[in-house]
Image (cartoon, grey):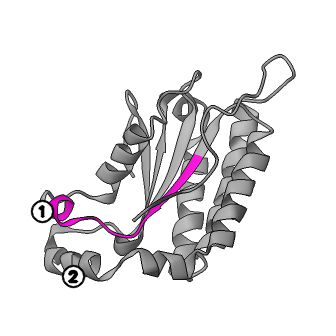
Amino acid sequence: MTGDRESGLTRTGGRRPSRLFGIFRWIQHMWIGPAHVSRAISRADFLAIEHAIFEGEQRHHAEIRFAVESSLNTSELWKEVDARARALDVFSHFRLWDTEANNAVLIYVLWADHAVELVADRGADARIDDAVWQEVCDLVSEACAKQRPVEGVIRAIAVLNDALARAFPTNGTRRNTNELSDAPIFLR
């Protein structure tokens, strides 16, 4: 587990690639493609994830995004980009840091590495207990290992929504605007 309090938080779940298995990692990333993810997560599953995010966000004014990427390209592999670095890139690229209360959370899965990363902006990081972050990572990691990724993602979103509802409740004085799309991000 690693974190950077100034720029947000990242949490790691599942296996992390090591330098020792570099050639195997290259082969995995060349072999694994969008079709592998599509077989495990259908369009209906993506809609169920989007619905879980939407329903949960009705109870708080934080933002959740889910992203899954099948594999990295050769230039990223050459630069030895890991899931953590890629999750931070995705967080930045989709401007998840650009919420009013700095309370966006990204659940990122790098399929080829069997890696799960959470990136939370500083507002969310400051108010959510470390045990919740770890539970969310573990739920997704364990479900992916059992080849039931959608079940794990939806359960993780529920846990995250509960924690965010306690930390950022919609108490009638704050209008609940949806600052970010709820649709999952499928990076091919």
| Residue that sits furthest to the top in the current view | 173
Three-letter code, disc 2: Ile
Which contiguous range is marked in magenta? 65-77
* Residue 167 or residue 104, whichever sits in front: 104
Q: Which residue is drawn at 64% across and 47% down?
A: 182
Is 153 left, or right, of 161 in this rendering? left
Report if residue 75 lies within the magenta region: yes
The answer to which image quadrant residue 22 occupies is bottom left
Three-letter code, disc 1: Trp
Q: Which residue is drawn at 79% across and 48% down?
A: 55
> Label 1: how many residues lie within 10 Å, few (<14), some (14-19) or many (20+)?
few
> Label 2: how many residues lie within 10 Å, few (<14), some (14-19) or many (20+)?
few
Report if residue 158 lies within the magenta region: no
Q: Considering the numbered disc 2 on the image, is that residue within a helix, a strand or a loop?
A: helix
| Pointer 2 with pointer 1, Cβ within 8 A | no
Mark 1 — residue? Answer: 78
Mark 2 — residue? Answer: 27
Residue 166 drawn at (x, y percent): 75, 35
**Mark linked to residue 176:** none
